[in-house]
Image (cartoon, rainbow, N blue to C red):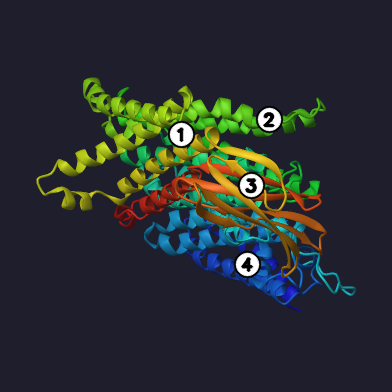
């Protein structure tokens, strides 16, 4: 009975989503305050119904209700309870329900936090979000219902969750990623509302900015968690593979980064209005494109959901309607989205414009590399793959140039900056950065590209610190009081920029200075790598909750001193008949020792993969710093004081 209630709850939620997308817009057209006021209660009811459906599906997993097809495909009675709950979003149908729940959550947050907005503005934003929700609930009900029954012949046991997903990464990575993906719908809704009302002044940018910052922060930590998960779970020792599904989340992140900077300029100076609106539209549309790539079945990836073509067609139609409708509205209103404020070639606006142009080119580069093989295949011209060599050779130089622009921007003044003043500010930090980068590159025996990359990372850090010092020392009140007076938005920018530099250092060192080897070892053998001795003490066999495993015993020492004891595993999951590799890692701030157990070679011999990875943790440390920067920016006190003016 409960699954039927969950399914009926989804059907009712579709009714309220449709109502939310119609009544407020009609009320705005008719200037009917009663219809406009319906937006908030409709939002709350829609969210409650979707939440009820999600809770029922979660409960069905918890009690092993294998009469539900989705539960029988993605769970098992032996699965630990925490994986049973996270298995709710371990497959296509449940993850889509989580997507809809998070979308409703963002809509509800706007309804609650937007109480000081003009009624028509708040109601139109909620209506646009209701329209998006209508599309996804329809997708869920018509192609991907998670409540399909197997009655009367329900299986006694489930097929189990994919072993790749039986990890803490599944518990936290998808929800964080979806929070970022879906959160950009709020900026999209504000942009469309601004186009409808025809007033694109600083008010809409001020309101969209904190929502965009929070969404960007969630997407940042979601991508960071995905990289960390792939690193330790897949057993290859890599942190990024330029997989098409990884790119699907990276593209909206790049566009969202450009959107944040563009919103800042629109809010401060009233320029880049067209640019900002288009970025808001395309950032959300790239999120929808990511949904299509993951769920349409056009990609084969460890991250993708197996799906039938019907689902892909549905998402394509949804994508076409969203993009086409938004761009049509933009074309109609284009004459009203003109900026009349000018700025100089060395003003902060110019540097932020260069930032946005570079981020847009980078996004298009990733988009081309991701879609080109699909287009070639669809045209019957054969199958090709675009991998790391293309992305690294094209993307890396642009990323370094972006960071150069990123560091200069905060030191420049709005409108115009005297060129001699800019040179004076940049000269000494440039010399310090080049020397520091050169010393590090020489010490670690790195090449010219590494020297340039380290210098750029140092340049960003030094200029950021210099800018902060100038700001806090320019007042007679003292450094500490002045530092406290600086807005949270500024400190958010500082954290995000330093996070970029930290990640760059991690990427550089782990890419050019890692050591690895694949060796054949029997009990008592020793392998030496980067000065570390890896002693193989044999393999233990043990029974897990829903698997059996061979566990390697490896003791690591250096110069005769004990360092760590690692236990990589080779697991066999009986329900699915799959074998999984579980790496064992001794992590540290400056290096990781990474060991994975390969194949049983017979006669007590095993294949062992050993890695020494310097600074790899800095990649994810930088991601955390960027995430914190986004959250801190959204908490700026200015965003709590909302103007009642219409946008």
Measured Cα–Cα span from mark 2 to mark 4: 39 Å
Residue under numbered circle 3 = 526
| Helix, strand or loop under label 2 | loop
Q: Which residue is rendered at x = 78% and y = 60% of the image?
A: 572
Q: Position of residue 103 (x, y in %)?
A: 57, 58
Measured Cα–Cα span from mark 1 to mark 2: 30 Å
Residue under numbered circle 4 = 50
Q: Earlier in the sequence, mark 1 or mark 2?
A: 1
Comparing 294 with 386, the one in front is: 386
641 relative to 138 in the view: left or right: left
Quarter of the image with the N terminus is bottom right
Instruction: Tell us which disc is closer to us: 2 or 4.
Output: 2
Q: Are marks 4 and 1 in contact (CB under 8 Å)?
A: no
Residue 386, disc: 2
Q: Which residue is rendered at x = 40% and y = 42% of the image?
A: 199
Instruction: Tell us which disc is closer to us: 4 or 3.
Output: 3
| Helix, strand or loop under label 4 | helix
Mark 1 closeness class: few <14, some 14–19, many ≥20 residues within 10 Å: some
């Amino acid at each position: 009975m409960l699954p039927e209630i969950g399914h009926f709850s989804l059907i009712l939620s579709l009714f309220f989503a449709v109502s939310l997308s119609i009544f407020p817009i009609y009320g705005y057209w008719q200037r009917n305050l009663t219809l406009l006021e319906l937006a908030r209660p409709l939002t709350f009811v829609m969210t409650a119904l979707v939440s009820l459906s999600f809770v029922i599906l979660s409960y069905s997993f918890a009690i092993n209700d294998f009469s539900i097809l989705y539960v029988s495909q993605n769970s098992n009675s032996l699965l630990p309870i925490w994986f049973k709950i996270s298995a709710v979003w371990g497959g296509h149908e449940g993850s889509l329900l989580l997507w809809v729940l998070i979308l409703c959550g963002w809509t509800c947050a706007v309804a609650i936090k937007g109480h000081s907005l003009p009624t028509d503005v708040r109601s139109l934003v909620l209506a646009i979000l209701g329209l998006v929700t209508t599309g996804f609930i329809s997708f869920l009900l018509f192609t991907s219902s998670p409540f399909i029954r197997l009655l009367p012949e329900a299986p006694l046991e489930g097929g189990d969750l994919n072993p790749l997903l039986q990890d803490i990464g599944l518990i936290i990575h998808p929800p964080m990623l979806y929070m970022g993906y879906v959160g950009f719908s709020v900026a999209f809704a504000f942009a469309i509302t601004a186009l409808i009302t025809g007033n694109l002044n600083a008010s809409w940018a001020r309101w969209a900015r904190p929502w965009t910052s929070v969404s960007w922060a969630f997407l940042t930590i979601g991508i960071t968690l995905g990289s960390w998960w792939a690193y330790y779970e897949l057993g290859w020792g890599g942190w990024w593979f330029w997989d098409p599904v990884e790119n699907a989340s990276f593209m909206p992140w790049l566009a969202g980064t450009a959107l944040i900077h563009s919103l800042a300029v629109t809010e401060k100076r009233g320029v880049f209005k067209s640019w900002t609106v288009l970025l808001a539209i395309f950032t959300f549309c790239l999120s929808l494109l990511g949904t299509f790539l993951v769920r349409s079945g056009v990609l084969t990836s460890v991250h993708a959901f197996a799906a039938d073509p019907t689902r892909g067609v549905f998402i394509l139609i949804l994508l076409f309607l969203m993009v086409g409708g938004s761009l049509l509205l933009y074309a109609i209103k284009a004459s009203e989205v003109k900026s009349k404020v000018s700025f100089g070639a060395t003003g902060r606006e110019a540097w932020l414009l260069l930032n946005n142009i570079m981020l847009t080119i980078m996004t298009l580069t990733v988009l081309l590399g991701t879609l080109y093989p699909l287009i070639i295949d669809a045209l019957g011209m054969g199958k090709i793959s675009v991998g790391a060599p293309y992305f690294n050779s094209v993307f890396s130089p642009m990323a370094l140039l972006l960071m150069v622009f990123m560091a200069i921007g905060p030191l420049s003044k709005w409108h115009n900056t005297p060129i001699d003043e800019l040179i004076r500010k940049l000269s000494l930090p440039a010399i310090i950065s080049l020397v520091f980068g050169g010393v590090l590159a020489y010490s670690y025996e790195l090449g010219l590209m590494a020297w340039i990359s380290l210098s750029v990372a140092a340049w960003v850090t030094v200029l950021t610190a210099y800018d902060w010092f100038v700001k806090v020392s320019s007042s007679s009140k003292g450094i500490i009081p002045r530092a406290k007076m600086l807005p949270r938005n500024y400190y958010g920018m500082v954290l995000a920029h330093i996070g970029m530099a930290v990640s760059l250092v991690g990427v550089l060192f782990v890419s050019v200075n890692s050591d690895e080897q694949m060796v054949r070892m029997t009990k008592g053998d020793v392998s030496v790598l980067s000065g570390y001795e890896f002693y193989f003490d044999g393999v233990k066999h043990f029974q897990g909750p829903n698997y059996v495993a061979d566990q390697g015993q490896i003791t690591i020492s250096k110069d005769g001193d004990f360092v760590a004891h690692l236990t990589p595993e080779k697991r066999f999951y009986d329900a699915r008949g799959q074998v999984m590799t579980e790496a064992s890692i001794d992590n540290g701030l400056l290096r990781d020792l990474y060991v994975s157990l390969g194949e049983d070679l017979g006669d007590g011999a095993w294949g062992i993969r050993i890695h020494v990875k310097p600074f790899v943790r800095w990649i994810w440390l930088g991601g955390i710093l960027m995430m914190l920067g986004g959250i801190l920016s959204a908490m700026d006190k200015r965003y709590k004081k909302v103007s009642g003016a219409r946008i």
